[in-house]
Image (spheres, coloured by chain):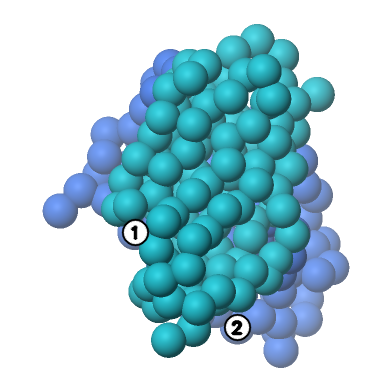
Chain colours: A cyan, B blue
Amino acid sequence: GNSVTQMEGPVTLSEEAFLTINCTYTATGYPSLFWYVQYPGEGLQLLLKATKADDKGSNKGFEATYRKETTSFHLEKGSVQVSDSAVYFCALYTGGFKTIFGAGTRLFVKA
Amino acid sequence: DGGITQSPKYLFRKEGQNVTLSCEQNLNHDAMYWYRQDPGQGLRLIYYSQIVNDFQKGDIAEGYSVSREKKESFPLTVTSAQKNPTAFYLCATSKPAGLNTEAFFGQGTRLTVV
């Protein structure tokens, strides 16, 4: 079946450090891939997405590239800020009406 | 503003009570979803609805019920049969299926059993 695996958190970084959050997936067909972010006490909001192999999604300094050969969609940011502290969810969608979410990775950024 | 409104933001339930969580949307999306979020477990799908008067069970439907009488509304009832209801509940919507389909989320309702 379809699934998403994310690196376990929490991830703790100092401000301006480089961020990588790993995400790999298992899916039949050709899924779309997403990263969502959840700030404390709030719902999820879409951060970026990619719909086909080699696509790069980007937003607010975050990037992720859809790698079909390694079934991965790792999230990266060159210089994190305290305001980036949140929980990040990798997700895939293969059609129909169900999105599959990873378990989430909590990020703490220290000033 | 277009969006999804969940209410209340915080809800307390006594043992043996049923409670209903509200979800209203003005995005004109066909599909609506309820997820449960527990610490460290990500999101688990409770119920979803593709169209008015139709809904399907998700992965953890036991102890929950829903209705979809209007396109804009998808209330979730947590019944007394749900033995461990304390969690953060998220309502979401999406447009008709397509590979760009992203989910839009409400702000959530935190339910606590007292």
Which residue is at a point 71% across and 89% down the rendered structure image? B114
How far apart marks 1 and 2 lie (CA) works out to 19 Å
Label 2 crowding class (10 Å Cα cut-off): few <14, some 14-19, many 20+?
few
Q: Can residue B41 be seen in the rendering of this structure?
A: yes
Give whichever of B96, B113 is nearer the camera: B96
Q: Circle 1: is it few (<14), some (14-19), or many (20+) Cα within 10 Å?
A: some
Q: Chain of mark 1?
A: B
User: From the viewer's perspective, is residue B81 above or below residue A24?
Assistant: below
Q: For this rendering, which residue is in front, B77 or B42?
A: B42
Q: Earlier in the sequence, mark 1 or mark 2?
A: 1
Mark 1 sits on what residue? B5
Residue most extreme to the left: B1
Residue B18 lies in quadrant: bottom right
Q: Position of residue A90 (x, y in %)?
A: 58, 44
Residue at left 32%, top 46%? A59
Q: Can residue B61 be seen? A: no
User: Residue B12 — which label?
Assistant: 2
The mark lying in front, picked from 1 and 2, is 1
- Residue at 81% x, 70% y: name it: B84
Are the residues at dot 1 and dot 2 in contact (C-beta closer than 8 Å)? no
Q: Is residue B75 above or below residue B113?
A: above
Chain letter for the residue marked with disc 2 in the picture? B
The answer to which quarter of the image holds residue B110 is: bottom right
Going by the numbered disc 2, the residue's amino acid type is: Phe
Q: Is residue B8 left or right of residue B43?
A: left
Which three-letter amino acid code belongs to the residue tagged 1? Answer: Thr
Residue found 41% across the figure and 67% down from its top = A80
Give coordinates of residue B87: x percent, y percent: 67, 70
> Which type of secondary structure does the marked residue at label 1 adopt?
strand
Q: Position of residue B90 (x, y in %)?
A: 53, 57
User: What element does badge 2 sit on?
Assistant: strand
